[in-house]
Each structure stands twice: as C-alpha cells, then as structure tokens.
C-alpha cells in the first residue's frame, strides 16, 4: 500500500528513488529542503483537516475552464493545487485545502493563510528559496508541511510527487469517501520534457491510488495500457 493513514516508507523509498533517478534530482537537496521547512513551521496535525466520509474534488489549474468550475458540486469538498486557487476564489467556491510547492501565486497562498485558510506546503530541493521567502510571511498556524523523503516533525509524507497527485494522496489520507478530478490535463503536448516525465510519474501514482481505492478516474482513461500502477 502506498496510501492510507501513514505512508509505508519501506514501500515508498524505492518509488521515490526511481522518480529522482529518472528526473535527475538529488536526495540531499530534498533533505535540505525538508529541514528548512521543518524549522520554519509550527506543529500542525494534518488530521485536523479530516475529510472522513466526504466527497472530494481534486482541482487542478491545467484545464480549469468555466465548464469545469460549473461542474463542481456544492456538496463536494475542494482540495486544489496552487494554480487553481485564483479561479476558484473568483468563482466564489470555498476551498478546504490548497496543496502547493509555492511555484504558483505564492502571494495569493500567503493571503489565504492570513484569512485562516488551510495550506499544505511541500519541500523539495528546487524550492528552498521560495520556502525561505514566503513561509515566514504566512500565518503558520494553518500551514502543514509535507516532504518526499523521510519526514521529521512537524512534516509528514503521505505519498504523491507533483502538487496534483499529492493533493489526491492527502485527501485519501484524510478519509475521503470518493475522489473526483477536475481541471486536469495529464496528456498535454505543450509541456517541457521534464514536466512530461513528472506527469508520467503522476499518472503511475494515480493509477495505483485508483487501484487501491477501487475507484476509476476518467482522466486516466486511455492511459492505463501505457502505464502500470506502482507496486
């Protein structure tokens, strides 16, 4: 299992190693980012944001047009990536949690924190400058930190790699009854080669989550034959 109440690091470790090897990332930089974020944050239990039994929409910004926003059900709890936040706020839709590594609209994320809105901030080797610049400005009483290496307090690791698939793993961890994906474009041909490889890993992780939860996510239709679940 790579989802659930606590990430099984014995299972996650080889997945993480395969990802960073493919993408050319440095574990030591991820660990340095983890330590940086841990030093900046207050204790915060992710479980305060329980989604137990809730219907949850995981909202991304890649294809979040008006039709996608209109499709959102008022009874769904929204967990979104940072690049979807502005459009959701403009639509008046309440957001339960924003999941971000601060590479998209960090000022808006910061303002949200000061209005009491929960934020999940991820530490990785390429965003240390953003962590040092933005986290101290936030209302850290509503910020939970995540890492992709072995966690240290107050950070956690519940799985996922990109903001979008990590949002899904967080919702799963928090007990979501069902997951629905809105505004996603996993097959974009306009992204860079490095982003393409990240999306390919997101697909593999989401296929695994789909399999473990016994659900079927339409945005993965047409991709199942090309990618296998992990584990």
Image (cartoon, rainbow, N blue to C red):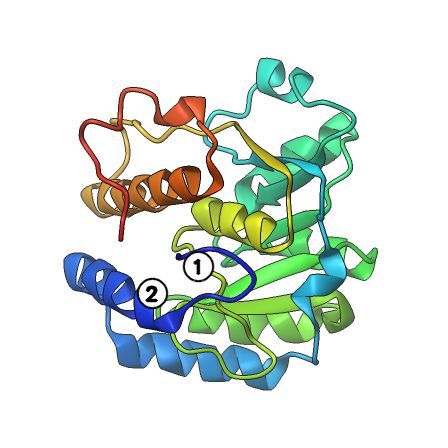
The location of residue 219, given as percent across then percent down, is 41, 24
Against 69, is 67 above or below?
Answer: above
- Relative to 173, is 157 on the left or the right? left
**Residue 12, image quadrant:** bottom left
Residue nearest the viewer, comparing 66 with 15: 15
* Residue shown at 61% from the left, 81% from the top: 40
Q: Mark 2 falls on what kind of element?
A: helix
Against 109, is 30 above or below?
Answer: below
The location of residue 160, given as percent across then percent down, is 42, 54
Which residue position holds label 1? 159
* Label 2 Cα crowd, 10 Å radius (few <14 / some 14-19 / many 20+): many
**Residue 155, image quadrant:** bottom right
Residue farthest toward the right in the current orientation of the protein: 115
* Residue shown at 47% from the left, 52% from the top: 166
The location of residue 141, given as percent across then percent down, is 77, 71
**Residue 27, image quadrant:** bottom left
Q: CA distance from mark 2 to mark 1?
A: 7 Å
- Determine whether label 2 and label 1 are within 8 Å by CB: yes
The location of residue 52, given as percent across then percent down, is 71, 48
- Relative to 231, is 177 on the left or the right? right
Image quarter hosting the N terminus: bottom left
Residue nearest the viewer, comparing 117 with 90: 117
* Label 1 Cα crowd, 10 Å radius (few <14 / some 14-19 / many 20+): many
Against 121, is 99 above or below?
Answer: above
Which residue position holds label 2? 12
């Amino acid at each position: 299992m790579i989802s659930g109440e606590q990430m099984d690091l014995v299972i996650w470790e080889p997945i993480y190693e395969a990802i960073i090897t493919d993408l050319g990332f440095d574990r030591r930089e991820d660990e340095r980012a983890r330590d940086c974020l841990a030093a900046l944050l207050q204790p915060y239990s992710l479980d305060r944001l329980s989604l137990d039994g809730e219907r949850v929409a995981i909202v991304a910004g890649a294809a979040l047009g008006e039709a996608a926003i209109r499709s959102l059900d008022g009874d769904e709890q929204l967990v979104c990536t940072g690049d979807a936040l502005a459009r959701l706020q403009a639509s008046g839709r309440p957001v339960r949690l924003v999941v971000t590594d601060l590479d998209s609209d960090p000022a808006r994320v910061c303002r949200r924190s000061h209005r009491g809105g929960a934020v999940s901030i991820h530490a990785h080797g390429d965003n240390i400058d953003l962590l040092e610049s933005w986290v101290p400005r936030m209302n850290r009483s509503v910020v939970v930190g995540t890492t992709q290496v072995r966690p240290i307090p107050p950070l956690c690791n519940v799985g996922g790699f990109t903001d979008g698939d990590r949002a899904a793993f967080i919702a799963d961890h928090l007990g979501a009854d069902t997951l629905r994906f809105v505004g996603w474009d996993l097959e974009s041909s306009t992204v860079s080669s490095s982003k393409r490889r990240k999306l390919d890993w997101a697909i593999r992780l989401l296929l695994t989550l789909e399999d473990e939860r016994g659900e079927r996510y339409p945005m993965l239709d047409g991709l199942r034959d090309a990618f296998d679940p992990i584990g």
